[in-house]
Amino acid sequence: MTDFNNFKLSKGERLCHEPSIQALFKEGESVFAHPFKLTFKRKATTDALPTQVLFSVSKRNFKLATDRNWVKRRLRELYRTHKRLFYNAEGLPALQHLAIVYVAKEKIDFNTLKKKWISVSKKIDVRC
């Protein structure tokens, strides 16, 4: 069971293992809703390990590192506060890996991002 009052994003929840990242993009499913593209890999087991997440912002769309970091901070905040949407009814994580790619070419205000984030995250069926 997961404590949904814990809004932390720990090191164990970040995806940074190169073979896992390659497998995610090679074998994973995708959902797109502007400005997000979510690529995910479902869990094969019912273990309680947390979902590992990766955040990406294109250097082509945001030339300045400060702008890319600004967007990534917003993405991390959205995931951190709404990660309960990726848990099933038993409180177990439904996804093994998740990549959140920001595809818009401009910065979008946080309230608009929040609405779009909730709509795109609900497209992933976590009941499996």
Image (cartoon, rainbow, N blue to C red):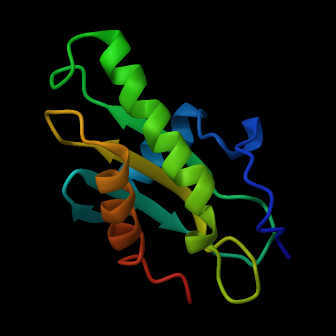
Which is nearer the eye, 86 or 45?
86
Which is nearer the eye, 70 or 55?
70
Q: Residue at x 45, y 42 (%)?
A: 75
Looking at the rendering, which quadrant does residue 87 occupy?
A: bottom right
Q: Is residue 48 left or right of residue 73?
A: right
Q: Would you place residue 108 above or below residue 91 in this image?
A: above
> Where does residue 56 sit, x and y in percent of width and height?
38, 35
Q: Is residue 103 left or right of residue 24?
A: left
Quarter in which the N terminus is drawn: bottom right
> Where does residue 13 sit, x and y in percent of width and height?
69, 46
Q: Is residue 26 left or right of residue 19?
A: left
Q: Residue at x 36, y 53 (%)?
A: 111
Q: Is residue 101 left or right of residue 107?
A: right
Q: Residue at x 16, y 26 (%)?
A: 61
Q: Residue at x 84, y 68 (%)?
A: 3
Quarter in which the C terminus is drawn: bottom right
> Where does residue 5 sit, x and y in percent of width and height?
79, 63
Q: Would you place residue 71 above or below residue 2 in this image?
A: above
Looking at the rendering, which quadrant does residue 30 occupy?
A: bottom left
> Where does residue 68 sit, x and y in percent of width and height?
34, 22
Number of callouts in the render?
Answer: 0
Looking at the rendering, which quadrant does residue 49 occupy?
A: bottom right
